[in-house]
Every structure is written in structure tokens, then in C-alpha cells.
Amino acid sequence: MRAVLQRVLMSRVEIAGEITAEIGRGLMILLGVQAGDSPAEARQLAEKIAYLRIFEDPDEKMNLSIIDTGGEALVVPNFTLLADARKGRRPSFVEAARPEAAIPLYEGFVHDLETLGVSRVATGVFGADMLVTIANDGPVTILLDTSELVR
């Protein structure tokens, strides 16, 4: 599983001109599910994100997590995070999980964030063509991959 986290002042998803999800201060999370990923990896990634200290404390040090700040999260499914562009000019997406495997893991990840205490978790729509607006704060952008996380 791969996630791109962006600390945001606000973020929203529009589908066909209609706002379908919106958050204030918190994290915009683009989530890619890889073939072979498991619910345990989804939980591990959710825990890492929920407790990752990337928000500033009163001394302007990154010491606070999204839970500490009461921040919100917007989770958008994004299979293109699994693109392999090492060969040729067209990326390959064979590493991305098929929807029948990816959707339950995506939903499980969202549920895990909620149960870990993220104040509000909004979502994109799996398989939809979305316009995503991001007001990146910092900018702070972090890439996480479960294959690289210490267990």
C-alpha cells in the first residue's frame, strides 16, 4: 500500500461539478492499494498516519499528530500511485490491486483511521473521475509505503 500525505488547510473532491467531500485543517491522503496487500497492512498504515507527528506545536516544531490537533482526513483512492514507469513511455499499472480486492482494503483503511480517533474522515469515490483541490500547508508532503515500514 502506498500513501501520499499532504498537510492541508483544506481539501475537497468534486465529481461532475458537485462537491462530494470536503475537509478543513488536516490531511489529504491519496491511497494506492497494491495487489497482495492485506488488512493488516491497511491497519499498519492507518496507525502510522494517525500518530505521525507532522503538525506544529506552539513552538513551531512538528510534534503533533492529526489526532492531537483534532484534524480531519480526506482519503482518495488513487491506483496511479502504483505506476511503474521504469520502462518505455507509458506507465504500467499491473501492481495495482483489482477493484474487488482494493475496495475492501480502502474501506478498511478509512474505518481504521476512524477507530484510531481521527476526528472526521471524508472519502473520495472509488473509480470516479475526481477533481481534487488541495491547499497544501507548509508545504508538507510525505510518501509512505507499507513495504518500507518497520513492523
Image: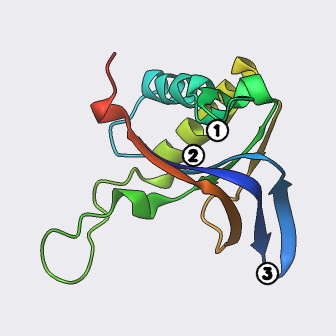
Residue 68: x and y, percent? 74, 23
Residue placed under numbered mark 3 in the picture: 16
Q: Please indicate whether residue 18 sits to the left or right of residue 11 in the image.
A: right
> From where the camera sits, is residue 71 visible?
yes
Question: Residue at 78% of width from left, 72% of height from top?
Answer: 14
Q: Amino acid at mark 3?
A: Ala
Please tell me which residue lies in front, 68 or 57: 57
Q: Amino acid at mark 2?
A: Ile
The mark found on residue 49 in the picture is none
Task: Mark 1: give few (<14), some (14-19) or many (20+) Cα within 10 Å.
Answer: some
Separation of marks 3 and 2 at Cα, in angstroms: 21 Å
Residue 131: x and y, percent? 69, 75
Q: Is residue 42 above or below residue 135?
A: above
Q: Amino acid at mark 1?
A: Glu
Task: Mark 2: give few (<14), some (14-19) or many (20+) Cα within 10 Å.
Answer: some
Question: Residue at 56% of width from left, 22% of height from top?
Answer: 47
Separation of marks 3 and 1 at Cα, in angstroms: 23 Å
- Which one is earlier in the sequence, the residue at label 3 or at label 1? 3
> From where the camera sits, is residue 114 visible?
no
Secondary structure of the residue carrying numbered label 2: helix
